[in-house]
Amino acid sequence: MQNISSYDFTGKKAIVRVDFNVPLNENFEITDDTRIRAAIPTLKKVLEKGGSLIIMSHLGRPKGVTEKYSLKHIIYRIEELLGTKIQFADDCMKASQTAAALKPGEVLLLENLRFYAEEEGKPRGLAEDATDEEKKAAKSAVKESQKAFVKTLASYADCYINDAFGTAHRAHGSTALIAQYFPNDKMFGYVMEGEIKAIDKALGDPARPLTAIIGGAKVSSKIGIIEHLLGLVDNLVIGGGMVYTFMKAQGGKIGSSLCEDDQMDVALNIMAKAKEKGVKILLTDDVVAADSFSNDAKTIICPSNDIPDGFEGMDAAPSSVEEIKAVIMASKTILWNGPIGVFEMPNFAVGTNAIAETLKKATEQSAFTLVGGGDSVAAVTQMGYADKVSYVSTGGGAMLEYLEGKVLPGIAAIRE
């Protein structure tokens, strides 16, 4: 494993896996270029050190060649940020000659990797009534052709850089398998380095007290993270729709609030484990409840274990928000994943926005603050605090799996 800061790129072609899976509107205009901007330091490093670039990424979830998901739509923005002209290969498997002709300082962007089933290693076009044998045969066939797919991509370059943390949890051709062709010339890009260092700092040897704030709708989607964190944190704040499963499990009345009845035993088990490990669990005891799932609904403030019929919990109430803020300000390391209210509706984003504001203040007082997860990231970004906290993860699913303690294929492939 090499280090991007010290590697000699002089005269070498670097194939770089980035995560340029950015949102586009109906006119194919980029509506959020965060992921592109994040990869620019890695790309510039190669060029500044005398190398040439072959950039590869996916966009969306196409089932074959699809105009909507062509990477040609984002070339203009990469050129603006990178400050150089970019060549484009409209078929990632037919770029040998163009790649071979690249000179130091030149850049080639490959078309969407997922136009080929071999990137994900999943068969396509199977009939709905396909038998198990047919499915097995199709999967075997695409896995076999995946080897040729990966070998072709690897043949374009002298070294490999993985800078796509957002796809590090996928054992895809360009994120994990390709690394084997560069046993002595593979490395992380700056995005990957930053993500790994930030999470390891938060959970590996953190300054204490360590507090994790886990929000979101469902216990079932966060159980792995919560159970892993119970062995690491001092305080665990649970918010969002998950709270009502915990409250009902303890005999509370939750009105028409979201609840996973099949997860109530899990909730009770989590609380028992927390007590056993000496972890303080903080649930949002008071909530803002509404008589309909609407921004303009009638609202009341009530205990989260005594919500009237016809009302559902939508956000943390001011008293609960103040309690969470106090825990944050008393902590030295804070990890935040998931909103504590229906963040999509302005009237119920108050609690989530208050956490973003408090994390900014905690960071100013030298706490290490790590934010990850779609709505959490959206909150700090919309409030202009993305650069006011210690680290904002772009990882999504990859961050969630890393927080669960899982080995991510994209990371393991570089470290092997």
Image: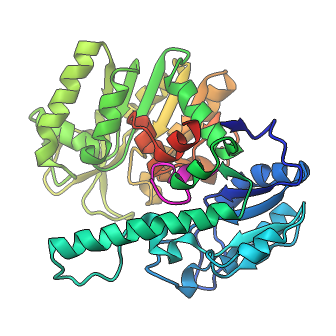
* Residue drawn at the location 53% of the way across and 42% of the way down: 411
Residue 105 is one of the magenta-drawn residues: no
Residue numbers of the magenta segment: 163-175
Query: Relative to residue 298, is residue 205 depicted above or below?
Result: above
* Residue drawn at the location 15% of the way across and 30% of the way down: 268
Q: Position of residue 61 (x, y in %)?
A: 46, 72
Query: Relative to residue 274, is residue 350 depicted above or below?
Result: below
Q: Main secondary structure of the magenta part?
A: loop
Answer with left or right where residue 305 lies relative to residue 346.
left
Count of number-bearing discs = 0
Answer with left or right where residue 138 lies relative to residue 348.
left
Query: Relative to residue 12, is residue 3 depicted above or below?
Result: above
Q: Position of residue 292 (x, y in %)?
A: 26, 63
Which of the 4 quarters of the picture holds residue 194? top right
Which of the 4 quarters of the picture holds residue 99? bottom right
Q: Quadrant location of the N terminus?
A: top right
Q: Quadrant location of the C terminus?
A: top right
Answer with left or right where residue 26 lies relative to residue 318.
right
The foreground one among 109 and 304 is 109
Q: Position of residue 188 (x, y in %)?
A: 66, 43
Query: Relative to residue 290, is residue 205 depicted above or below?
Result: above
* Residue 386 visible to an observer of this rendering: no
Q: How is the image coloured?
A: rainbow
Answer with left or right where residue 28 lies relative to residue 116.
right
Q: Position of residue 110 (x, y in %)?
A: 67, 72
Residue 166 is one of the magenta-drawn residues: yes
The foreground one among 125 and 257 is 125
* Residue 240 visible to an observer of this rendering: yes
